[in-house]
Amino acid sequence: MFVILGDGELNEGSVWEAALVAGAKKLDNLVVIVDRNGFQANLATEELIPLEPIADKFAAFGFAVADTDGHDFAALEQAFATVPPAPGKPTAIIARTVRNKGLPSLEGRAERWFVDLQPEEVTMLLAELEGAAAGPLRSAPLVVR
Amino acid sequence: MTATEAPAGLPSPTYEATLGALCAADERIVVMTAENRAAIRNLPAALGARFIDVGICEQTMIGMAAGLALRGRVPVVHALSTFLTLRAFEFVRTDVGIARLPVKLVGGVPGFLSEANGPTHQAIDDIAVMRAIPGMEIFCPADDRELSAGLPAVLASPAPTYVRYNARPSALAHEPFTLGRAEVSGGGGALAVLAAGMLVPFAAEACASLRASGVGARLVNLRTIAPLDEAAILDAIAACRVLVTVEDHLLVGGLYAAVAEMLVRHHVSVPVVPLGLDARWFRPGRLADVLEHEGFSAGRLCARFKKALAEHGGSARRRTPAPAVSSIAGGMATNRIAFNPDYPSISSSDALYARATKLIPGGTQTLAKGVGQNVCGVAPKYLHAGKGAHVVDVDGNEYLDMTMGVGPLVLGYCDPTVDDAIRAQLAQGITFSLMHPLEVEVAEMVRGMVPGAERVRFAKNGCDVTTAAVRVARAFTGRDKVLCCGYHGWHDWYIGVTDRDRGVPAGVAALTHTFAYNDLDSVATALDHETACVILEPTTFEAPRDGFLGELKRLCAARGALLIFDEMWTGFRLALGGAQERFGVTADLACFSKAVANGMPLALLTGRADVMQLFERDVFFYSTFGGEALSLAAAQATLRELRDRQVPAALDRLGAGLRGAYNRLADSLGAPFTRCVGFGCRTLVTFTNSGDHAGVAAGADPLLMKSFVQQELIKRGVLWGGFHNLSAAHTEDDIAHLLRAYGEVLPLLRAALEERRLPSALRGTPVEPVFRRTGNFNVKPKPPATAKDVPNARA
């Protein structure tokens, strides 16, 4: 059973209720993947309600934890292949990621989620996904909502 | 509300600017968010510690907000509507709702405004759940202007409020904002459209198209779903043939549901076409596409309005007109239960009173209804219709009634069950030549409800049975003297102790003395071998202390006197079995009236068989109307309703909430000199001018303070004599309106006191002293004949 969580989502109390139960019930068929990109809607996570050390938190709740590069498919594959790494324990994979990875114009930029893109900008970004270099959008302000 | 071509006046201040200005003016306001800053990006820098971002945890935020509200802050909290109203629902209900704390819940992207978000983010059930919380206000601004215009009133309201955030601009120009009052445009004709929130501009455009094509259409922008402007809706029904509700919400629990519930409650049957989301989520997309697809663009609405008219606008439909109360109150020149711009016109009241002064001494038949208890020149003098807890005066002004006929209307005016029972009996006859079966049936019912009711007799007014009780106590004990505490009516045996004792023979007056409530010594000193009975109101606003009532019973029994409870106010109200049930003390005799027949004249005397059997031959107590059947039929229905609907417990809860909210409000407004006291079913507002809490009221005249509050409440559609005489018809909305009115009036009172201009702030003659307080009459003490006769120096 694979569950993907955003890191900002870890603010919610219900996440930790579920983690407590998963540990208590020894759900070793459960894999929680945290998309750890460091940002939530408006701010960097560590500026508001700091989450680190995330790995220690999950370990304290009874999880076997793997802290990985979320863009390293080989590392992820290995983590998935060894589930459960510890019998009787649920698994948490902290996947460290960079926002908008693979779109050089937008990669790592701190603007918020809700960005309005013009049709020509979408075309440029699609080209970047196919391997084009960063376009003029890299230095343009984004229209955020 | 009119659509204008050019922008109407100045550009609207943004939500952020309006909220920021309110924060600058009122340091109690705290802005909070669950990491939802879209509308308040600049407030963190401006507010410093008064801005709290808790992260994405709505439940925790509500808990914190409730705590801050308990400490006198006014938290304005922000989150996406779905998570604010649904994820945190139980926190809102329990932490904020039960305590009625002034937490302002601002929900982002409600309804169609979530646009391309999927069902997880579509708040289309938010109004349903918020509406279920007692006392919760729901503000649905039509556009950015209305949002900013309504915000001051929302923050000033002492109630919790849910704001369906909508800052979209529109071409509408609005009337000044009054919380709870709808904005109406267009006259009468075929169609009335009821809408609230972001769909209002589209509905306005659709209505304009209809009018341009010659079809009459009225648009009612409700602005708040709770409180709901029922008068505006009933007005619209009177003026139009078909009603359409427009909402970006599920049909379950939203605007349509609120309107439908209200129409059933008012016994109004009219075609209503609901336009909303019928048991499904909407298809996500850009707003314009969503509106078009779901049928809410101006063009699609116009077509749907025409279809509604074609299907329901024919002349063959059945329809029951709106009740008299609302249609009378709907005229343009009259005030409503709202924050009216001016004091009501009372010219018809004054004209009637001018005729009465030449014909009816004192003007009134009931002291508390007369001009002495109401600010002359401002307050209405004559009422002519009532429904539930609302009344209409002879000038057509409507009021929320907190006096309720000075007690009888325990179920409210024109209770349908009681009125049906009266009508059914009316068809059979009113008063007969022999006894009537209802005498037996109602007596049996009373025996089953009232502790110690071994025997039961009927009469008309409360003073009939207090007087009969005193007479039978004298006969039973062979003694003449009476000790009393409270108000017991106009008869010689009692009224001789007051300052209005002319015409009472001195020999009779000398037989009655008063004692002080909760002062057992004052009774013990006076209760001698000549005392036939001790009669008292078992409580008024002060609770019995240290087993006072039980001790009183023991003392009476030890000295051979009878204990009589005057339960005019407590009977069937404090508990079904009155004070005897509530406090677990059974008196020898108990007297009832007021609540027993919901407005029909009936009084009860109950008590011990060995005492009451004296009425068989020795004591004469008979009258023509004692067994009159209309009142007995009303009593049978009333007592059944009180029992089955558990009305006493409901009044206790409602009143306790009101009392707590009033006192918190007074404290938060810097007006600790006023307090709300008493048991839930009937509380009293007091004003003190001395002691630790007097503050700016030190030395001021309490009657002037009371008069001023009454004057200002009248302007806000509340008829008030200092008491909260609750009925089963008083709704949470009524109480919320009353508290909002207090929220405006107490600061005015405080300001008038601070500036030492209370007398000039009064627009009429002040009220006179209330003619009754247990243990502390506003009457002259009776001069003692001997030192032994002094029952209590303070009386």
Image (spheres, coloured by chain):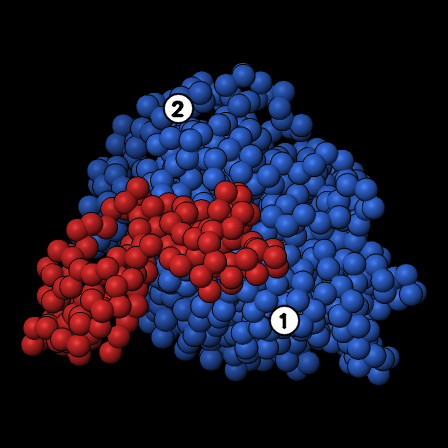
**What residue is at 77 percent from the left and 41 percent from the top?**
B7
Q: Amino acid at mark 2?
A: Ala
Give left or right: position of B301 versus A45.
right
Hey, which residue is sitting farthest top in the picture? B756
In this view, B223 is above or below B507: below
Camera-side residue: B534 or B307?
Answer: B307
| Circle on res. B694 | 2
The secondary structure type at the circle numbered 2 is loop
Q: Amino acid at mark 1?
A: Gly
Hey, which residue is sitting farthest right in the picture? B214
Q: Is residue B577 visible?
A: yes
**What residue is at 51 percent from the left and 61 percent from the top?**
A127
The secondary structure type at the circle numbered 1 is strand
For mark 2, name the chain: B
Locate the C terminus of chain B by quadrant.
top left
User: Where, by quadrant of the figure, is residue A78 drawn?
Assistant: bottom left
User: Where, by quadrant of the figure, is residue B614 drawn?
Assistant: bottom left
For mark 1, name the chain: B
| Circle on res. B130 | none
- Check the rendered structure and report the hue given to chain A: red
Q: Where residue B239 appears, x then y in whole percent?
A: 82, 63
Q: Which residue is mark 1?
A: B276
